[in-house]
């Protein structure tokens, strides 16, 4: 075989392999989504620990409500929410761009003892707030172990999930949520450790990371939730 023919064959093989890989990772994303789609609604109870610079927020009980496709509400004891604006979508289903995306295989990496496939999701349209989602998927169990989401309006935030008895529904026992503290909107009712102006507060938060940890103790899945709960 002549050299230029060998080059053509190698090029065609590379193209075919890339196409198959793209099809495979897209299929994997859809399998994960289909698993999450088992859940029409849930109510969950747990404990939330907040670690945000300058904010006093002790560990407290929380109640979470979710209803397909995107209704989500988190209540902390006393009615105080301590999640940033962009973090309201800590329900896992919102990490997956459901339509009009390109999936790119970015290799594999171990997270703890779990081997994960890294998949980058690029929305095809310009109207989506999400610019890029990077998912770390446990292929064997179709679970999202970690995600990094970059948005137009709310910066970049990261989630890590730990699974246990609710894994069959794709629901985690623990969620670790981190974000840029400078993008954090201080909720009413939270006591600050200093007296200062809003701008000075933002200046002090620059370069700081906020972190929210939620450990769930119980879920009620597919029992039905009224829309009025989310108002």
Image (cartoon, helix red, strand yellow):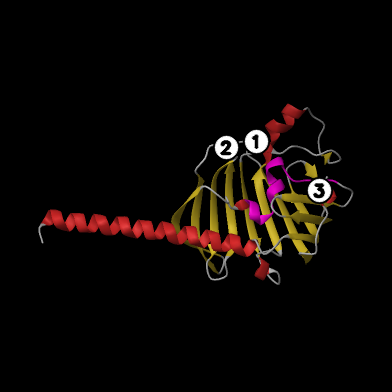
Mark 1 or mark 2, earlier in chain: 2
Disc 3 and disc 1 in contact, CB within 8 angstroms: no
Kindly state the secondary structure of the residue where label 3 is placed: helix
The magenta stretch spans residue 215 = no
Q: Specify few, some or many for label 2: CA neighbours under 10 Å numbering under 14, 14-19, or 20 or more.
A: few
The magenta stretch spans residue 88 = yes
Query: Residue 210, position in %: x, y?
Result: 69, 46
Q: Specify few, some or many for label 3: CA neighbours under 10 Å numbering under 14, 14-19, or 20 or more.
A: few
For the C terminus, the image quarter is top right
Give the residue drawn at x 71%, y 41%.
85
Kindly state the secondary structure of the residue where label 2 is placed: loop
Residue at label 2? Answer: 127
Near-viewer residue (221 or 118):
221
Gap in angstroms between the C-alphas marked 1 and 2: 28 Å
Residue at label 1? Answer: 206
Q: Identify the mark at residue 230; answer none if there is no mark.
A: 3
Mark 2 or mark 3, earlier in chain: 2
Gap in angstroms between the C-alphas marked 2 and 3: 25 Å
């Amino acid at each position: 075989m002549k050299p230029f023919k060998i080059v053509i064959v190698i090029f065609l093989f590379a193209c075919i392999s890339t196409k198959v890989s793209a099809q495979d990772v897209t299929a994997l994303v859809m399998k994960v989504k289909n698993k999450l789609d088992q859940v029409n609604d849930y109510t969950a109870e747990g404990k939330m620990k907040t670690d945000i610079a300058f904010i006093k927020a002790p560990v407290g009980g929380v109640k979470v409500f979710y209803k397909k496709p995107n209704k989500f509400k988190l209540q902390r004891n006393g009615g105080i929410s301590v999640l940033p604006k962009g973090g309201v979508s800590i329900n896992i289903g919102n990490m997956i761009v459901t339509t009009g995306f390109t999936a790119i295989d970015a290799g594999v990496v171990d997270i703890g003892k779990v081997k994960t496939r890294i998949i980058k999701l690029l929305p095809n349209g310009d109207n989506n707030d999400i610019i890029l989602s990077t998912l770390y998927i446990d292929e064997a169990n179709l679970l999202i172990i970690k995600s990094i989401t970059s948005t137009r309006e709310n910066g970049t935030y990261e989630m890590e999930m730990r699974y246990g008895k609710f894994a069959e529904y794709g629901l985690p026992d623990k969620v670790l949520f981190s974000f840029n503290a400078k993008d954090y909107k201080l909720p009413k009712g939270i006591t600050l450790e200093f007296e200062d102006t809003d701008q000075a507060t933002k200046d002090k938060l620059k370069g700081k990371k906020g972190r929210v940890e939620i450990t769930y103790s119980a879920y009620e899945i597919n029992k039905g939730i009224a829309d009025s709960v989310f108002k």
